Amino acid sequence: MKNAMKRILAVFTAVSVMAALAACSSGSAGSADGKTDGPKKYKIGVIQYATHPSLDNCYTGFQQGLEEAGLKDHTIDFQNAQGDNANGDLIAKNMVSKKYDLIVGIATPAAMSAYSAARSANIPVVFTAVSDPVAAGIVKSNEKPGGNCTGTSDVLPLEQQIKMIRAFLPVAKKIGILYTTSEPNSVSQLAKFKALAPKYNFEVVDIGVTNASEVAAAAASIVSKGVDCINNFTDNNVVDNLSTVLQVADGAKIPVFGSEEEQVKNGCLASQSIDYVALGKVTGKMAADILTGRAKASDTPVYMVKDCTPVYNKAVMEKLQLKLPEEYATAAAVTK
C-alpha cells in the first residue's frame, strides 16, 4: 500500500513539474514574469526629415521591408520634422525617453538627430536616404559602422549624371548647383561633382543656402551668373523647395536635372534615378534583423545603392526644344 502511494505521489509530482515548465515556456520571449503571451511587440520610432516624394517612398518601402522580413507584431511612431533640425532633435529625444526598441532616420538630418539622441541610451538607429553617412559622423566607415547605427545610402551616380547632362546639352559650359551648407551629404557631393566636372568640360557655379527662405534668391542669383542648367543633389532643403527652383529656371529657359524620378515627374528634365521604395525595403529588412537579434548595427555594413535608371520628362524636353540623345533612346519617359 505504501509503495502504491509512493508511485502515485511520484507521478503527481512529475505532472506538476511538467505543467510548471509548460507555463514558463508559454510566456513571451523577453518577458521576465511570463505574463505576456506571444512574441515581443517591438516599438519603432521613425523620424522623416521633410515631406517630399523620395522620402515618402523610403517610408513606404520601409514598411514593406518589415513585413517581407516577417516582422508584423510591432508599432510605429511616425513623426515628421517638417524640415527643421530642432524639431528632429526634440522628436528623437522623446523617442529615446520612451525607450523605443529602434529609431529610424529618413534623410541625413533626421539620421543625425536619431544618432545623437540614441547613442548614450544604446538604442539602435537605422537610417535611409543618407548619401554620405561617414561625412555625417554617424558611422565610422561604411564597411564597419562601429557604433549602434547603420542603414542604407542613396549615394548618387555623379559621373553618370554629368554624362547625361553633357549628352542633353552638348555645347553647355556652366552647371549651377544650389546646396544647403549644413547638410554634410550635399557638401561632400558638391566636392565630388566639382572634381568630375572638368573631365566633361564643365564649370560648376555653386551657391550655398542655410534655410528654405534663401532658396528663391539663391536660384535667381545662380541663373544671373549665366549657367546653362541647374543640377540637384539629394539636398533635402533644395528638393523641398523644388517648385521655387523650377520657376526661376523656367523663366530663364534653362533645364533643371534632378537626382531621382520624382523630381523629374515634378518638372526636372532628366535624372539618373534611384528607386527609393526599393531602398526603403532594404532598410526595413535590416531593421528587422537588428530587432530580432539576427544582426548588430555595429557589424552591419551600410548598404550602398548600386543601380540607377535614366529617366526624362518628355513635356519638359519639348518645351525647351531639346532632343532625346541617342544613347538614352531606351530611357523611361515619366509624367506626373
Image: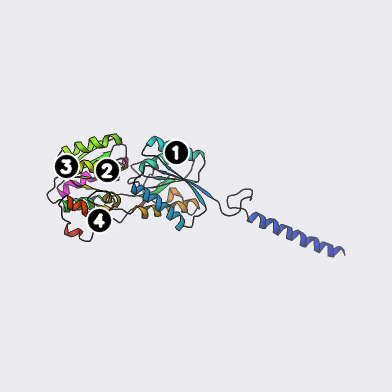
Is residue 199 a member of the stretch shown in magenta? yes
Mark 3 or mark 4, which has the lower sequence index?
3
Picture coordinates of residue 195, whole percent (x, y): 21, 45
Describe the element under mark 1 as helix, strand or loop: helix
User: Mark 4 Cα within 10 Å, few/some/many (few <14, many 20+)?
Assistant: many
Picture coordinates of residue 67, whole percent (x, y): 46, 56
Q: Which mark is residue 310?
A: 4
Give the CA separation, mark 3 to mark 4: 25 Å
Mark 3 or mark 1, which has the lower sequence index?
1
Tell me if label 3 and label 2 are in contact, CB under 8 Å: no
Q: Residue at x 40, y 54 (%)?
A: 281
Counting the numbered discs, the total is 4
* Residue type at tag 4: Pro
Q: Residue furthest right?
A: 1
Between label 3 and label 4, give the one nearer the viewer.
Answer: 3
Between label 3 and label 1, give the one nearer the viewer.
Answer: 3
Describe the element under mark 2 as helix, strand or loop: helix
Tell me if label 3 and label 4 are in contact, CB under 8 Å: no
- Residue 195 appearing in the image: yes
Q: Which mark is residue 91?
A: 1
* Residue type at tag 1: Ile
Tell me if label 3 and label 1 are in contact, CB under 8 Å: no
Mark 1 or mark 4, which has the lower sequence index?
1
Quadrant location of residue 208?
top left
> Which residue is tagged 2?
243
